[in-house]
Amino acid sequence: MIGRTHFQLTGWIASNGPALIFGFALIAIWEAVTRGLALRPNIFPPPSLIIWSLYVRADLLMAHAWLTFSQTVVGFGLSVLIGVPLGWAISKSRILFAAVYPVVVVLQVLPKEALAPLLVLWFGAGTLSRTILAFLIAFFPVVINSILGVRSLDPNMRHYAASLVCGRWQLFTKVEFPSALGSIFAGLKISVTLSVIGVVVAEIVAGRSGLGYLLLFASSRLDMAFSLAILAVLAAWGGALFAAIALVERRVVFWRG
Amino acid sequence: MVRSLGPLHNIFRVRQEALISAAVFLAIGVVWHLTVTILRIPALLLPGPITVLQAAVANADTLLEATAYTFLEILLAINIAATTGFVTAILIASLPALRRMVFPYIILTQVVPKVALAPILIAWFGIGMQSRLVLAFLIAYFPMVINTLAGILGTPEPSLRYTRSLGASELQLLLKVRLPAALPAIMAGVKITAGVAVIGIIVGEFVASDQGLGHIIIESLAALDTPLTIAATLVVGCLGLLLLAVLELVDNRIVYWHHGQ
């Protein structure tokens, strides 16, 4: 077991080594250039200063990060809870599919971020408008991928299941749902990062709290070290959410390699 | 599927879908109008579609000017992102060493909420078209790179081997085999790029607000001129829709063999 882990580690380094070296080199050059040319550290901060402000302002960051994090999770969760069953219903009913699917496709390509100011007008500059924007942006990829997942089922599978005297419920739990899961998870991975974007846009456009607001505030005071630190936190949060979904996917859709 | 009908069948299907969409949107408009009039919702909160239309007509000059400006910005951003993304992808595809160095980071950028860069870019580039273009570029560039690269690297191995057996050079391989094979993926990349470029420019106009439709939305909101806010938001939506419809048409023309299947 240890030998195997060791082998995996060396394999990982062999495949990602160049990228790691490139990343470190980039950070080193950035640090050297900003310090060597004596650029104004508040506008062009060296990486060390960004990490330092991450550490110094940890309390302030945590207070605002909590709001942003919880709103993305709620917005994304709602988009899944409503999107997957709706996608299911749309793909199962011929009338719903004909009437709703073209509309869903049109709404999908509309820039929902443009709704941020209107949502603030209707629901205030608080938590609600941000969660709604996150939901609206994350919702459509979930619906569309659920529809595609259900409809991409090989008809032979359905015939085969029917030949085994499979009931409706069994057809759903044993055949249709598992086969749609791959596509559904692809949608979830898209929309989980979109939900972060939704919350951040609403916070930037009209927020009084949250990381987007904090970022706007820090930038307006030309504290770029702190601004970039906040951006790093947002990137890490987006990455963590994506990784979490990918992890669940690997557990749930284990047969897909 | 009725294959023999071919394009005719396609046109019929497309027409039918367009009709249904139009009917649904018309229904939404009617419901919107009825709700506003029956519930007597104040125009400050939610004006009816007719009030919005009146506001659009009354402010036609400013709206048109802003639309032209925003549209220009969007087109510029799409062009810059699509060409640089295309070139980057070809470079990365032809240089495996470069690919190993940067590809993991290009994938990583997908989880970064790049719209959050808006305030930072204003500090660096000032309030104006420049910071908006940089924002839209940063949002739109990476999907183009990823899609083009996936298309070029996903060329079927047999066609590569066959062309090599005919004595084709690597350049010929790229121009005659890889790029045509990658065309569907490249067009998909352009469509994603166009969609997110609209978002980048509009968010940029919200934050670095001095011109364009985003500026009108923010200004009218502050002036509590809700009909104009909604009118401008609808124009943004139509702009995005129009762009993608045009690209869809172009896609159908260029990659005709892919859609016929």
Image (cartoon, coloured by chain):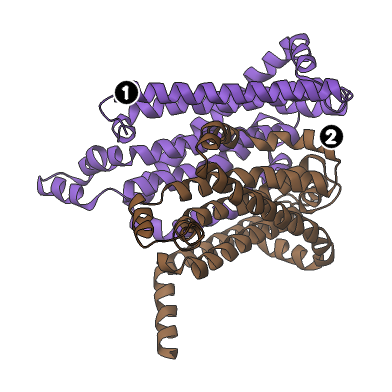
Image quadrant where one finds the C terminus of chain B: top left
* Residue located beneath label 1 in the image: B7
* Residue B18 vertical placement versus B168 (above, below): above
SS type, badge 2: helix
What shade has chain B been given? purple
The reply to whether callout 2 and callout 1 are in contact (CB within 8 Å) is: no
Subunit of mark 2? Answer: A
Question: Looking at the picture, how far across and down is residue A255, in whole percent?
Answer: 41, 68
Left or right, B49 with respect to A146, comes to: right
Chain A, colour shown:
brown
The residue under label 2 is: A121
Q: Which residue sits at x=70%, y=30%?
A: B128
* Tag 1: amino acid: Pro
Position of the N terminus of chain B, as image quadrant, is top left
Tag 1, which secondary structure? helix
Residue A9 appears in the rendering? yes
Kindly give the residue lying farthest to the front in the view shown. A165
Q: Residue B43 carries which label?
A: none
Q: Position of residue B214 (x, y in %)?
A: 72, 28
Of A244 and A216, nearer the camera is A244
Mark 2 surroundings: few (<14), some (14-19) or many (≥20) residues within 10 A = some
- Co-location on one chain, circles 2 and 1: no
Q: In this view, does B152 lie to the left or right of B27?
A: left
The x, y position of residue A24, in whole percent, is 54, 65
User: In the drawing, does residue A25 fall left or right of residue B10?
Assistant: right
Query: What distance separates the C-alpha of mark 2 from that of mark 1?
Result: 47 Å
Mark 1 neighbour class, 10 Å CA radius: few under 14, some 14 to 19, many 20 or more: few
